[in-house]
Image (tube, rainbow, N blue to C red):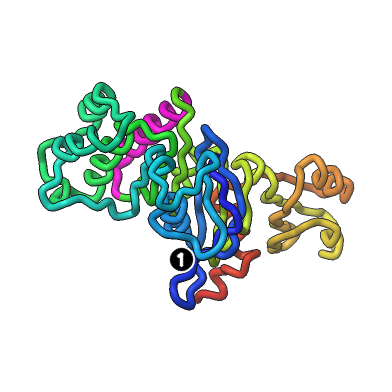
Amino acid sequence: MIEIKNVTKMFGELKALDSLNFNVSDGSVFGLVGSNGAGKSTLLRVINGVFEPDAGEVLIEGENSFENPSAKEKCYFIPDFPYFYNSSTIQNTAYLYRKLYPDWDEEYFNKLCATFPINTKSNIINMSKGMQRQAALILALSTRPKYLFLDEIFDGLDPVVRQLVKRIIITNVTDRNMTVMIASHNLRELEDICDHIGLLHKGGVVEEKELDKLKLGIHRVQIAFNRPIDESVFEGFDVINKSRQGSLFSLTIRGEYEEFMPRLEALEPAFLEALPLTLEEVFINEMEGAGYDINNLV
């Protein structure tokens, strides 16, 4: 388990992380989403011991992660811009990793090299962004990490390779109980693979839930009446957004479907439909609630 306890990280006057508190259970795929500069990449670096928190602590299986080799050897972090030496290839980097990582799996390494469409003897630095990410994944997964941390891993991957990456990650989670944290702006990809989501804004957690509970907790409702009606009838509902076109109201309602639908039906509408939001729609609505609204940006 990863425990994030009251973690704060400062860069000068900038508070990148502000008293974060949540846990990541073993065997889960945890997605980190948020506004630009929300602290997603900083959090991954703090968890992996790259940065020391200014307050609080991160525990991996009960051990502090900063400057702790026994905690770090269970982890592998692929940053947004993977770093390789000018002469690094997959093959010569694997030679180094065999000596560094006690759980290095040579058979699995060879399988991944054969699976990904990549030249393992070419200099990684000369590859495209997508190919560099494939190289980093091959090396990362071959170390057989218990905890895998990925920052914008889908950026630059073509659709076929994106599906391959998701399938390989899920296989490792299922077969080895590997825990994965993925920071990404690609909410569609996270929706496919994650079971938990953390929404960050300005260094703090806006929401942290199981993905299904997060999505099912907010609904898009369309309701129409064949008689004049005052908008005050919706005051008893937790309405996040509301718009109207003629007799049709479009509402975004927070709450349980089983609780608000009978109440809406009691209003005797001519038409009523409620659908759960996509992760992207949830993100937009939650960010608007936190003050991150497109109308305030343009």
- Seen from the viewer's position, the closer of residues 40 and 103 is 103
The answer, for residue 78, to whether it is visible in the render is yes
Give the residue pinned by disc 1: 37
Q: Is residue 139 magenta?
A: no
Does 87 appear above or below 236?
A: above
Residue drawn at (45%, 32%), measured in percent from left and top? Answer: 178
Left or right of residue 106, residue 197 in this image? right
What amino acid type is highlighted by mark number 1?
Answer: Gly
Q: Across the whole image, how many numbered discs are drawn on residues?
A: 1
What quarter of the picture does the N terminus occupy? Answer: top right
Predominant secondary structure in magenta? helix
Position in image of residue 87 (x %, y %): 10, 48
- Seen from the viewer's position, the closer of residues 169 and 236 is 169
Res 96 quadrant in image? top left
User: Which residue sits furthest right?
Assistant: 266
> Within 10 angstroms of label 1, few (less than 14), some, or many (20 or more) residues?
few
Left or right of residue 40, residue 245 in this image? right
Does 105 appear above or below 208?
A: above
Residue drawn at (76%, 53%), measured in percent from left and top? Answer: 224
The answer, for residue 276, to whether it is visible in the render is no
Q: Secondary structure at mark 1?
A: loop
Res 7 quadrant in image? bottom right
Question: The magenta stretch spans which residues?
Answer: 156-174
Residue drawn at (14%, 41%), measured in percent from left and top? Answer: 89
- Seen from the viewer's position, the closer of residues 7 and 263 is 7
Position in image of residue 147 (x %, y %): 44, 38
